[in-house]
Amino acid sequence: MTNTPEIMPSHNRPRLVLFVAFPDVGLLDLTGPQTAFWAASKYMERRGLPGYICQTASMSGGLVPTAEGLAVQTVKLAKFAGPAIHTIMVPGSPHIEQVLDRSTQLVKWLHRTSSTAHRTASVCSGTFLLAQAGLLHNKRAATHWAMCDMLKARFPSIAIDRDAIFVQEDEVWTSAGVSAGIDLALALIEADCSRDVAMEVARELVVYLKRPGGQSQFSELLRSQAQDRAAFDELHLWMTDNLSRKDLSVESLAEKAGMSPRNFSRIYKQKTGRSPAKAVEVFRVEAARRLLEDSSRNIDQIARKCGFGDEERMRVTFQRHLGVAPRDYRKRFSV
């Protein structure tokens, strides 16, 4: 007999999720979370449970052009009363400064309606609209990494978490750039319906079910690719596939890169801002973090797989990089 995943008791009617659209809205900011809620609703309804009603709305209604050029059909925001709205989702825009300049009425609507809606959330630079509406004063928040300085300059009272994928402060949620909106939606679905439902949605969308807080917007591999302008991309990919090897020395890496050890060390530090040995250590920490979050392997197995050799060496390295032991990291972030 197959066990049915446990699902939290739900409302006796579908939850209304209102997606706010405006000219130059980011298309994936809008449709990524919307697809996650749609998939969750399908899963719930197949089990005879109420899911979500997803509505896309704008101040004037009708067709709204996205930043990417595709127009989306909307209904008027005035049609919806705050108490009936379970979740307000506010996408961002690559042209957020211009959006803010022409969104006075939308900001007023957000300020008024969010006080009676169950919760309000933003994706990417949608955080600016929540901030303009006064919803983030003296609160912690996230946004796209490239817009953190601008957010801080415009709204200095906000405590910006520059690394977080998403942040919850009471009934206000904010997320990082673009695809992080899907991670945020999965967390909201988990809070409403259970982790099992969120996992089903993650499987359907072929994405990871991420956990709240403390997980960086960047992988170290992505950070390195951005910094070294592709000079060592192939080497980094090889390193991440071979972290369990004990011979990831400067000499072996230099040989893989086709350079002398001395020249390799100099050029690598110049391009990436860190020594080859430090890079290996950082990649090992990131790989271990992923396994602690997403696998059931014991600590010693993870230490060996990631090239630390043993649990104690991994513990010392984690303390140096993250200020926390591997066991405590797993307790906080594992699924």
Image: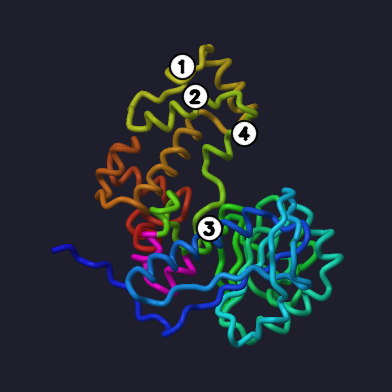
Helix, strand or loop for disc 1: helix
The circle on residue 320 is none
Where is residue 157, by image quadrant? bottom right
> Which of the two discs, 2 and 3, labels the residue nearer the N terminus?
3
Q: Mark 1 points at which residue?
A: 256
Nearer to us: label 1 or label 3: 3
Distance between the alpha carbons at the discs numbered 4 and 1 = 20 Å
Answer few, some or many: residues within 10 Å of disc 3's Cα (few below 14, many 20 plus, some between 14 and 19).
many
Q: Disc 1, disc 2: CB below 8 Å?
A: yes
Q: Quadrant of the C terminus?
A: bottom left
Where is residue 24, by image quadrant? bottom right
Tell me, yes or no, if residue 148 can be seen here.
no
Distance between the alpha carbons at the discs numbered 1 and 2 = 7 Å
Looking at numbered disc 1 in the image, what kind of residue is underneath it?
Answer: Lys
Where residue 111 sits in the image (x, y, percent)? 73, 80
Report the predominant secondary structure element of the magenta stretch: helix
> Which of the two discs, 4 and 1, labels the residue nearer the N terminus?
1
Q: Name the residue under label 4.
A: 273
Q: Which residue is drawn at 33% across and 32% down?
A: 244
Q: Name the residue under label 3.
A: 182
Report the magenta residues as a range. 187-200
